[in-house]
Image: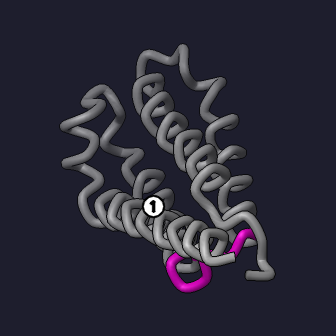
């Protein structure tokens, strides 16, 4: 029983750490989209940084909710949102302008979705 509680506590802590990273990533995208673009995908059109800010805002909301309530249901919902985002990036991967941004954004979203599944608490009842 103690081992189960300890494991559950570790999973909750890891979920919160993951959310903290996501919150920081979202804040960076919201407040410094130009720097992110310049560093990671300079071919991305500067006229489209509003989309990066929008993604940053979504990530801030999502990860703030996860920090406040890292319950299994919340984590699975966030994982689904991230998985959907990753899938929506696939059609853009072959684009010269948007391909690298889509790969980065979709890859990060897929990694968060997988990590939320693996690191999150296993049940609501504990």
In the picture, measured across the screen, residue 97 lies left or right of residue 107, that is left
Residue in view at x 73 percent, y 61 percent: 76
Residue 86: horizontal and vertical position, in percent? 62, 38
Q: Nearer the viewer, residue 70 or 10?
A: 10
Is residue 60 positioned above or below 45 on the image?
below
Residue 36: horizontal and vertical position, in percent? 25, 46
Q: Nearer the viewer, residue 124 or 6?
A: 6
Quarter occupied by residue 78: bottom right
From the image, which quarter does the N terminus lie in?
Answer: bottom right
Residue in view at x 65 percent, y 24 percent: 91
Q: Which span is picked out in magenta?
A: 66-72
In the picture, measured across the screen, residue 39 lies left or right of residue 64, that is left
Q: Nearer the viewer, residue 26 or 98?
A: 26
Describe the element under mark 1 as helix, strand or loop: helix
Residue in view at x 73 percent, y 81 percent: 126
Which residue is label 1 attached to? 18
In the picture, measured across the screen, residue 37 lies left or right of residue 117, that is left
Residue in view at x 28 percent, y 66 percent: 31
Q: Is residue 4 magenta?
A: no
Is residue 27 positioned above or below 51 on the image?
below
Quarter occupied by residue 38: top left
């Amino acid at each position: 029983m103690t081992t189960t509680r300890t494991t559950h506590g570790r999973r909750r802590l890891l979920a919160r750490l993951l959310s903290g990273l996501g919150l920081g990533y979202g804040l960076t995208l919201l407040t410094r989209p130009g720097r992110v673009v310049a560093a990671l995908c300079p071919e991305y059109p500067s006229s489209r940084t509003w989309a990066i800010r929008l993604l940053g805002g979504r990530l801030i909301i999502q990860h703030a909710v996860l920090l406040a309530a890292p319950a299994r249901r919340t984590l699975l919902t966030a994982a689904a949102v991230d998985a959907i985002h990753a899938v929506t990036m696939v059609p853009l991967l072959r684009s010269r302008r948007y391909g690298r941004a889509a790969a980065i954004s979709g890859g990060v979203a897929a990694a968060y979705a997988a990590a939320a599944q693996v690191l999150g608490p296993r049940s609501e009842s504990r």
